[in-house]
Image (tube, rainbow, N blue to C red):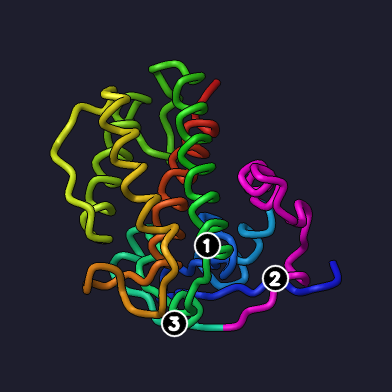
């Protein structure tokens, strides 16, 4: 590695998240900052599949030594629940046309990976700490409902739909990607809470977290 990977930390006394500041969706947690950084590095080969779409430059095998913590933030109940919940100063950086297209492309790749993973999985998933008793269709329903909430958060109003309505899902995603592809300053989208970089990260992270859950719970 010739250039460190900027990482932000969101932490509480019980849980920490380590998030790659420039790679939406690449974020992992641990009981401590050290464990979160170790988990982030361990998941790089899995995230490389997402980064490879569009032939983006990405180091698939970094070590913790390659990660540079550039920001610390206090977490909250959401952090302890298991969600990277707070936009960072790095998320407040503006995006030009190229960067906005890159971020949107990574979100789109995360969605596509989630779809492929869910479609290839059996309905019955192995029970255990990753998701408890929820099976594939329930995971899909959860992700679609969360994306509808995320759409509202960035100013896109989406009517309720059934999770297997592929036309409705595609329309929702197209509208969300249109928002993310626009050139942005540091202001939160739709006058709410999330700047564009954090929105891209949160949306991609949620899709990938549950795609990896399905993989981990598939026999």
Tag 2: Cα neighbours inside 10 Å, few (<14), some, or many (≥20)? Answer: some
- Up-down relation of residue 118 to residue 192 (above or below): above
* CA separation in Å, label 3 and label 2: 18 Å
The residue closer to the viewer here, 185 or 61, is: 185
Give SS at disc 2: strand
Point out the image quarter for the N terminus.
bottom right
The residue shown at (47%, 77%) is 94
Q: Which residues are magenta?
A: 43-70
Work out whether residue 200 can be spotted. yes
In the image: residue 96, left or right of residue 37: left
Which residue was labeled with disc 2? 5
* CA separation in Å, label 2 and label 1: 19 Å
Of callouts 2 and 1, the N-terminal one: 2
Residue 17, percent from left and from top: 49, 66
Q: Which residue is situated farthest in the left direction here?
A: 159
* CA separation in Å, label 1 and label 3: 15 Å
In the image: residue 39, left or right of residue 200: right
Give SS at disc 1: strand
Residue 114, percent from left and from top: 47, 35
Of callouts 3 and 2, the N-terminal one: 2
The residue shown at (52%, 71%) is 96
- Up-down relation of residue 89 to residue 101 (above or below): below
Tag 1: Cα neighbours inside 10 Å, few (<14), some, or many (≥20)? Answer: some
Which residue was labeled with disc 1? 30
In the image: residue 8, left or right of residue 5: left
Residue 170, percent from left and from top: 34, 33
Of callouts 1 and 3, the N-terminal one: 1
Q: Is residue 50 magenta?
A: yes
Which residue was labeled with disc 3? 73
Give SS at disc 3: strand
């Amino acid at each position: 590695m010739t250039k460190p990977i900027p990482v932000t930390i969101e932490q509480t006394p019980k849980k920490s998240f380590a998030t790659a500041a420039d790679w939406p969706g690449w974020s992992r947690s641990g009981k401590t900052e050290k464990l979160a950084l170790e988990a982030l590095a361990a998941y790089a080969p899995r995230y490389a599949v997402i980064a490879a779409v569009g032939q983006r430059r990405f180091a698939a095998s970094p070590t913790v030594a390659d990660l540079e913590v550039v920001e610390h933030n206090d977490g909250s109940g959401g952090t302890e629940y298991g969600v990277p919940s707070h936009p960072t100063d790095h998320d407040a950086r503006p995006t030009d046309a190229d960067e906005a297209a890159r971020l949107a492309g990574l979100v789109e790749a995360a969605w596509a990976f989630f779809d492929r993973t869910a479609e290839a999985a059996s309905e019955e998933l192995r029970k255990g700490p990753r998701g408890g008793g929820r099976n594939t269709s329930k995971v899909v329903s959860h992700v679609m409902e969360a994306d509808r909430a995320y759409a509202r958060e960035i100013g896109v109003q989406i009517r309720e739909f059934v999770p297997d309505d592929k036309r409705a899902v595609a329309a929702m995603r197209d509208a969300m990607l249109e928002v993310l592809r626009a050139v942005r300053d540091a202001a939160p989208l739709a006058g709410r809470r999330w700047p564009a970089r954090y929105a891209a990260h949160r949306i991609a992270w949620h899709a990938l977290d549950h795609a990896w859950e399905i993989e981990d719970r598939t026999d």
